[in-house]
Image: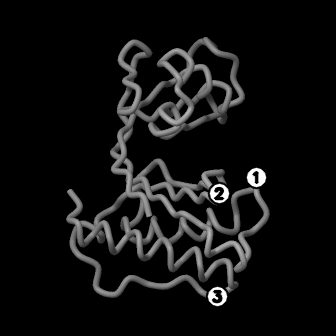
Amino acid sequence: MLSDEDQRALLDLARRTVEAAARGEPAPHLTNPSGPLREKGAAFVTLRIAGELRGCVGHIEALQPLWTSVRDMAEAAAVRDGRFPPLEPRELPALAVELSVLTPLIPLRPEEIQIGRHGLYIRLGKRSGLLLPQVAVEWGWDAPEFLRRTYEKAGLAPGTPDVELFGFTVLKLPG
């Protein structure tokens, strides 16, 4: 569980990292992070300008300290999301930074999907696709549509056999 102070520290770190990346400066460090921020954690950083997606990159597995994951994903969302050109300093005043801290993946059956609660991750061999829980809510999708879109994100036809389906929840921190 992240305290309000931890949440503010992570959001501040994400924003400072995005700003540094846009300016071509080194990523900042979090000085003396609290215990929960030093524990391994998975996170996604989403960038928006005027409500439109401008970058979104994350980890699905907790492989490094949460604060490091947030910093690395913020930098990647700013300058390495292949769907967008690198963020420029002139875009910073209009930029909204959102942080999603993920729980561990759990196997999920399609009938267990809860819109607004579960994010979805599908995997088959080297193909995989992930959608955060807020995506289904933002687009007004029901569970079958959310699942279909996750298949598509993985480059798979809906209903492809032998896929592994996982769910997760997030602590969403809007910045």
Q: Is residue 83 left or right of residue 59?
A: right
Q: Quadrant of the C terminus?
A: bottom left
Q: Residue furthest right?
A: 85
* Location of residue 174 with respect to 133 vertically, above or below: below
Residue 154 lies, in percent from the top left, at 66, 31
Q: Quadrant of the N terminus?
A: bottom left
Residue at screen point 50% across, 24% down: 164
Q: Residues within 10 Å of mark 1 (few under 14, many from 20)?
A: few
Q: Residues within 10 Å of mark 3 (few under 14, many from 20)?
A: few
Q: Secondary structure at mark 3?
A: loop
Instruction: Name the residue carrying label 3.
Output: 25
Badge 2 vs badge 1, beta-carbon distance below 8 Å? yes
Instruction: Name the residue carrying label 2.
Output: 55
Q: Secondary structure at mark 2?
A: strand
Identify the mark at residue 83; answer none if there is no mark: 1
Q: Is residue 128 left or right of residue 65?
A: right
Q: Marks 2 and 3, Cα distance to the nearest angstrom?
A: 18 Å
* Location of residue 135 with respect to 39 vertically, above or below: above
> Number of labelled discs?
3
Q: Marks 1 and 3, Cα distance to the nearest angstrom?
A: 22 Å
Residue at screen point 68% across, 84% down: 23
Q: Amino acid at mark 1?
A: Arg
Which mark is first along the chain, 3 or 2?
3
* Location of residue 66 with respect to 53 vertically, above or below: below
